[in-house]
Image (spheres, helix red, strand yellow):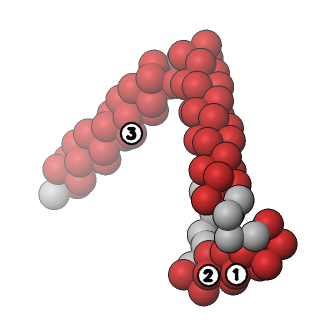
Amino acid sequence: MFQVGFLEVLLILVVGLFIIGPTRLPNAVKFIIKIYKKIQHAIFKFKNDLELEIGTDEIKKDVFNEMRMEELDLSAKLKKDE
């Protein structure tokens, strides 16, 4: 989701070390990771529920079939022209 490089993570940890302190920093990092994972899981669940509700699998199949039919029609036209 977010692209954070090594230098950004290092900077965040150094700032966190000064603000929170070395004794509470591990617990703070664990808490932030736990919250991030919960949010990520909720977004994933919402996305899956939404896809099930609107039937994206059927839409994808229909689009694939339409594209395949267009390819077959085009190849038939090309063979007819030859």
Sequence order check: which comes first, mark 3 or mark 2? 2
CA gap between label 2 and label 1 equals 6 Å
Q: Which of the 4 image quadrants contains residue 39?
A: top right
How far across and down, in percent of the image, does residue 43 sit? 65, 34
Where 58 falls versus 36 (above or below)? Answer: above
Secondary structure under badge 1?
helix
The three-letter code of the residue at mark 2 reads Leu
How far, Cα to Cα, is label 3 from label 2?
48 Å
Q: Nearer the viewer, residue 11 or 76?
A: 11
For disc 3, the marked residue is 67
* Residue 75 % position (x, y): 23, 48
Horizontally, residue 35 falls left or right of residue 48, namely right
The picture quadrant where one finds residue 65 is top left
Q: Secondary structure at mark 3?
A: helix
Question: Which dot, 1 or 3, sits closer to the camera?
Answer: 1
Q: Which residue is at a point 39% across and 26% down the rendered structure image?
A: 61
Label 2, residues with CA under 10 Å away: few <14, some 14-19, many ≥20: few
| Residue picked out by circle 2 | 10
- Name the residue at 60% across, 69% down: 3
Q: CA distance from mark 1 to mark 3?
A: 53 Å
Q: Which residue is mark 1?
A: 14
Q: Are marks 2 and 1 in contact (CB under 8 Å)?
A: yes
Residue 65 lies left or right of residue 60; in this view the side is left
User: Which kind of residue does numbered mark 1 sit on?
Assistant: Val
Q: Secondary structure at mark 2?
A: helix
Compare marks 1 and 3 and give the one earlier in the sequence: 1
